Image: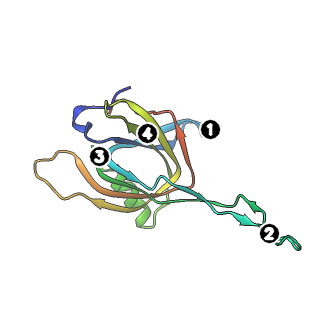
Amino acid sequence: MTAPENFLRPFRFHVDFLSASLQSQSSSEQVSLCRGAFSECTGLEATMEPKVIKQGGDNYGAPQRAGTVTFATVVLKRGMTTNRNLWQWFNAVATGGYSYRLTVVINVFDLKGEAAMAWQLERALPIKFKAADLNAKATEIGIEELHLVHEGLSTKDPTMKAL
């Protein structure tokens, strides 16, 4: 599997924004609502807060247990897409519409343009959208930054197909 189309080659992170199919009762069947390519991705992070269990008479080293997992905000920078769907998604949430959450798959490509791995964000929600500077020569829609909060982080096999 290779990176799609030459105009997206400089971008190492190709992103699918997926929604559960309305035709299927199964939540495993998903439909791609939008795709984009980005040159930078930060915030793929999960942190587990330890729970300290205090016990009477145990004065040396309290037992530690696994606690709640929290996720950092994922920031996609300097991206391109061929439609306005990401702005429309952000705008629908920002104007008081239904907070429509999507599954986001971030496909990572190696230097040869081969799909190397993918990260999946569960129930992602846009919290910041920053458009790129306007350029009369460009035909694609530029995105300077897209910030996403989410409720789960996992790795998976790359799913990117040609755009």
| Secondary element type, mark 4 | strand
- Image point (58%, 37%), residue name: 28
Choose the circle earlier in sequence order: 2 or 1. 1
Residue topped by disc 1: 25
Assign the N terminus to one quadrant of the image.
top left
Instruction: Report the Cα–Cα distance between label 2 and label 3.
Output: 60 Å
Q: Residue 83 got which mark? A: 3
The amino acid type of the residue labelled 4 equals Ser
How many residues crowd around disc 3 within 10 Å: few (fewer than 14), some, or many (20 or more)? some
Choose the circle earlier in sequence order: 2 or 4. 4
Choose the circle earlier in sequence order: 3 or 4. 4
The amino acid type of the residue labelled 1 equals Gln
Image location (x, y in percent) of residue 80: 27, 47
Instruction: Report the Cα–Cα distance between label 1 and label 4.
Output: 17 Å
The amino acid type of the residue labelled 3 equals Asn
Q: Nearer the viewer, mark 2 or mark 3?
A: 2
Q: Nearer the viewer, mark 1 or mark 4?
A: 4
| Secondary element type, mark 1 | loop
Q: In the shown orientation, is residue 45 left or right of residue 147? A: right
Assign the C terminus to one quadrant of the image.
top left
Residue topped by disc 2: 60
Choose the circle earlier in sequence order: 2 or 3. 2
- Image point (37%, 61%), residue name: 91
Is mark 1 in CB contact (under 8 Å) with mark 3? Answer: no
Instruction: Report the Cα–Cα distance between label 3 and label 4.
Output: 13 Å
Q: Nearer the viewer, mark 1 or mark 3?
A: 3
